[in-house]
Image: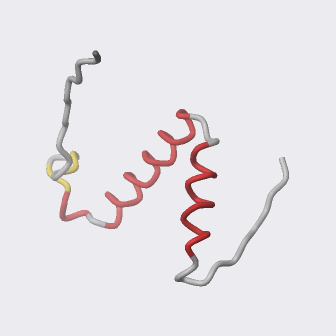
Amino acid sequence: MKKTVRKYSLKDPQQELDDKEFWRHQSYEYKILVVESLRRAWSKLNPERREHGNIKGFRRILRVVKQA
């Protein structure tokens, strides 16, 4: 795997396009691992949001969509 590092200015619109392209090619397993690591890091930085070991504030949302 070839690793590449790019520097962007804060207002460079190419950054968003490159980010979308990167995530488009990642597996769903990797995406879930990244979200879980971000969630754990957030909970460590915000201990006041914890209640009985669980994180308060996250809702479970389910929406059923009928396909035509």
How many badges with numbers are in the image? 0
Quick one: quadrant of the C terminus? top left
**Residue 45 on image: x %, y %:** 34, 67
Which residue lies at the image location 56% right of the left edge and 54% below the top edge? Answer: 20
**Residue 37 on image: x %, y %:** 46, 50
Question: Quick check: 2 left or right of 64?
Answer: right
Which residue lies at the image location 58% right of the left edge and 44% below the top edge? Answer: 24
Compared with residue 29, is residue 57 higher up or lower down, i.e. above or below?
Answer: below
Question: Quick check: 46 left or right of 5?
Answer: left
Return the residue nearer the eye: 53 or 46.
46
Which residue lies at the image location 58% right of the left edge and 61% below the top edge? Answer: 17
Compared with residue 24, is residue 2 higher up or lower down, i.e. above or below?
Answer: below
Task: Please identify the quarter of the rendering in which residue 6 is found.
Answer: bottom right
**Residue 64 on image: x %, y %:** 20, 23
Q: How is the image coloured?
A: secondary structure
Return the residue nearer the eye: 36 or 47.
36
**Residue 54 on image: x %, y %:** 21, 45
Return the residue nearer the eye: 33 or 4.
4
Question: Quick check: 42 left or right of 14?
Answer: left
Which residue lies at the image location 79% right of the left edge and 62% below the top edge? Answer: 4
Compared with residue 68, is residue 39 higher up or lower down, i.e. above or below?
Answer: below
Work out which residue is located at the far front of the displayed protein and give it.
68
Work out which residue is located at the far top of the displayed protein and give it.
68
